[in-house]
Image: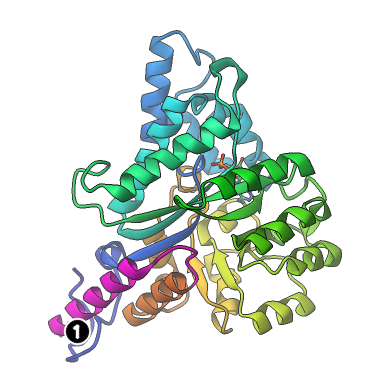
Amino acid sequence: MPATGCRSAGALPQTVDEAFVKALPKAELHAHLSGSVSMKTLHGMWSRKRASGRCLKLLDPLQAMLSIAESVDIISFFPLFDQYIYQLLDDIESVQEATRSVIRDFATDGVKYLELRTTPREHAQTGMTKASYVHAVHEVIQTHNNSYDVVCEQSHDIKVYLILSIDRKMTLEQANEVLDLAMTLRTGCVVGIDLSGNPARGDVETFTPVFRRAKTEGLHITVHFAEVLASATQRELEVILSWEPDRLGHVICTSEDVERTIKERRTGLELCLSCNVLAKMTEGSIADHHFRKWRMTSCPIALSTDDVGIFQSPLSNEYLLAAQHFELGPQDLVALSKSAASIAFGDSQSLRASLKTFETYFQAQGYGC
Ligand SMILES: CNc1ncnc2c1ncn2[C@@H]1O[C@H](COP(=O)(O)O)[C@@H](O)[C@H]1O
């Protein structure tokens, strides 16, 4: 643990370091499953597939993912999935292995509450259907939640929920299919639906009936919002706000009008520092990120990773970046984690309890000079 700053009984340490942000119990609310798989896990799959004569034309993830991380932008980002990652996650076995490894990686990073989101996907050659895909992911999460020490070697007090994503390029029928799947598994770990995918594609109005139905059925709604100028027309943003989403992701190219509505509603915001800067969705550096602006409002914020397998910045690092670039101290980071817990779709009781223990620990320690 960091031993810096001035000792003052009853206070948290004055500065933040890697050990602090890792130990801080955290909630991850915006993580795309396929984008969260580590290079190491993808490499293992690649090696096994190659040994059985598959994926022979695919580059080794240990090289491919590094060069992707260095050069990615919002245009080159989306084809990555179809052209690369989905070639490796093409059957039920790989999808389940990926889900297990993603849960383990978040747990190792001190995440105590995780909402994974994923888009139902099929693969004709391996016989994977959208339904079998979703059931496979769901089964891993349920097994994890229902048992201890199965997924992680150490104690893994991480609670995991699932959100099903509708891709902007889907038809109304396909989007309804996603909602139907979510409805079937809502007694399990599915807590909501999301709209994501390439923001340059599709017309959000197509999905109005689906999101209205989700709302009526009591499912939570989160939507990728104003990610780029093309998906930030006044009309698009008004259509999305008319669905009354519980949370919004990214929230970059907003107008004053739209911001007013979001603030009045105190909508939860999922903000992704590294992703937005590395994919050049925002101008400038982390210090210029709109986190600075939204932090001054009463909208609860959940710092999130988006696609840690691509952007290579785990949630603990996002907290560290926030501390470094927005002058946040330990108490601010604890408050930020509580803010994320307050907009969780599932039961975040155990995270709140961990946060309390964490605070008490530091208060008992006292830190400093
Ligand atoms: C800038 N960030 C983003 N914006 C919008 N959509 C994103 C995204 N990052 C990921 N996805 C969506 O999630 C899929 C991968 O995970 P799953 O196969 O669903 O688990 C991508 O194909 C894309 O549709």
Position in image of residue 325 (x %, y %): 46, 72
On the question of residue 73 being in view, the answer is: no
Q: Ligand 1 is located in which of the four quadrants?
A: top right
In this rendered view, identify the residue nearer to me: 188 or 52: 188
Residue 47 vertical placement versus 148 (above, below): above
Position in image of residue 121 (x %, y %): 60, 33
Q: Residue at x 73, y 65 (%)?
A: 243
Q: Which quadrant of the view contains residue 204?
A: bottom right
Q: Residue at x 71, y 44 (%)?
A: 175
User: Mostly what secondary structure, the magenta segment?
Assistant: helix
Position in image of residue 114 (x %, y %): 41, 56
On the question of residue 262 being in view, the answer is: yes
What span is colored magenta in the figure?
343-365
Residue that extends furthest to the bottom in the rendered view of this protein:
9
What is the number of callouts on the image? Answer: 1
Is residue 266 highlighted in magenta? Answer: no
What kind of colouring is applied to the model shown? rainbow
Please give left or right for residue 48 compared with residue 223 in the image: left
Residue 318 vertical placement versus 293 (above, below): above
Quadrant in the picture for the C terminus: bottom left
Residue bearing the label numbered 1: 363
Residue that extends furthest to the right in the rendered view of this protein:
235
